[in-house]
Image (tube, grey):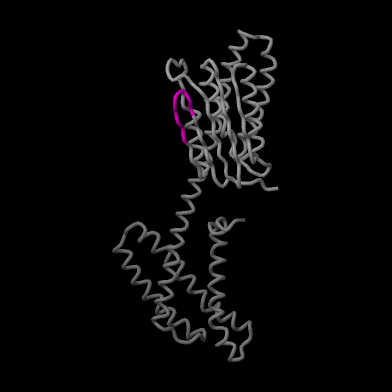
Amino acid sequence: MTIAKIYQNFILRNIFVNTLVYLVILACVYDEIKLDGHTWQYILSQIAIGYFPCIIWITCFNVFIIKPFLFRKKFQLFCLLLLIYWTGFYFFMDWFFPFVGLGNLKTLQILSLIINGTFFYFVHIVITKKMTQADKDIMNFKSELSFLKQQLNPHFLLNAMNNLYGEALAEPDKVPDRILNLSDMLRYQIEASKKDYVLMEEEIGFVQKYIEYYTFRNERLSVTQNIEGVHDEIEIPPLFFLPLVENAIKFSGETSEPFINLDLKVKCRNLTFTLKNNYLDSGSRLSSTGIGIENLKRRLEVYGLKHDLSCKKDKNMFTVKLSIWHLPTAVL
């Protein structure tokens, strides 16, 4: 059980806090009581006798006065109850301590006890609210991330079906092989979408298979790949490169001499992914939905990865560069 879960559990939290306070009191009074020749049992029982009513009074104050009146901004009634509480608590403890043989109670001590007990309750409320909000944020991020992942398969499948339709009309004998290739890629997408991170090697292998699929379809497409530093420990969120490669292949395919230059460098958990392709500056019949790039941008934000994503157009050349720092490593 994590510390956060322990803190959110009322019983475990109070056991931990009160045990800690009990040990602090023990450390403060141990030498003084021990000098009088008392046993361990006597010391522990005396501290418990003095501390227990304090717990009851402070808990009642926090639950029955602060929470229903102060937090609901009933300030006049709160001040009245606070005065009654302080007075009643002081006279009770002033009677109780001598009654159980713990000596006389000083005003400064009782006020310090009340103030500190109240302060810790306010701290608890703030911490609890922060933790609740953090849990909500995590749930929202997970829901959004799941939705973003689910967008990828239909987006990829739509493009693939359009391509298969064109191939079925032009070269029907190649369609069975293309379907098998497509099946392998979809299988990877389905499995990868279930994970938060995949190995970099697996992701690069998928991208290369995707490029291979389109080079078979478009023999004019020239692809240059330079991959350095990829090893079997670095992980990356799944399908991060797919939207960029999809766009590059799609828009380059309109030109008379389509080409793609892919450059990936990994060093010390940092990567730089650069993709260049040519495109028609004018007269293009394609229109981008923008789903892939926007999906990637949002996933980068949801994952909280330190990154830089830039796009540049220059003389029929489109360049996109993605840098990510401090990628996680696989737990072996």
Percent position of residue 217, x then y: 62, 16
Q: Is residue 312 magenta?
A: yes
Seen from the viewer's position, the closer of residues 124 and 146 is 146
Tell me where residue 283 sits by quadrant. Answer: top left
Majority secondary structure of magenta residues: strand
Where the N terminus falls, by quadrant?
bottom right
Q: Residue at x 48, y 40 (%)?
A: 308
Percent position of residue 63, x then y: 44, 62
The correct choice, above or below, for 274 with respect to 214 in the image is below
* Left or right for 74, reference 101: left
Percent position of residue 84, x then y: 35, 72
Q: How many marks?
A: 0
Tell me where residue 88 sits by quadrant. Answer: bottom left
Tell me where residue 35 sits by quadrant. Answer: bottom right
The correct choice, above or below, for 286 with respect to 104 in the image is above
Q: Residue furthest left?
A: 76
Q: Which residues are magenta?
A: 310-318
Percent position of residue 169, x then y: 61, 8
Q: Residue furthest front?
A: 315
Q: Residue at x 55, y 25 (%)?
A: 246
* Left or right for 265, reference 294: right
Q: Is residue 37 magenta?
A: no
Seen from the viewer's position, the closer of residues 81 and 230 is 230
The correct choice, above or below, for 184 with respect to 2 in the image is above
Q: Residue at x 40, y 72 (%)?
A: 115
Q: Residue at x 51, y 17 (%)?
A: 255
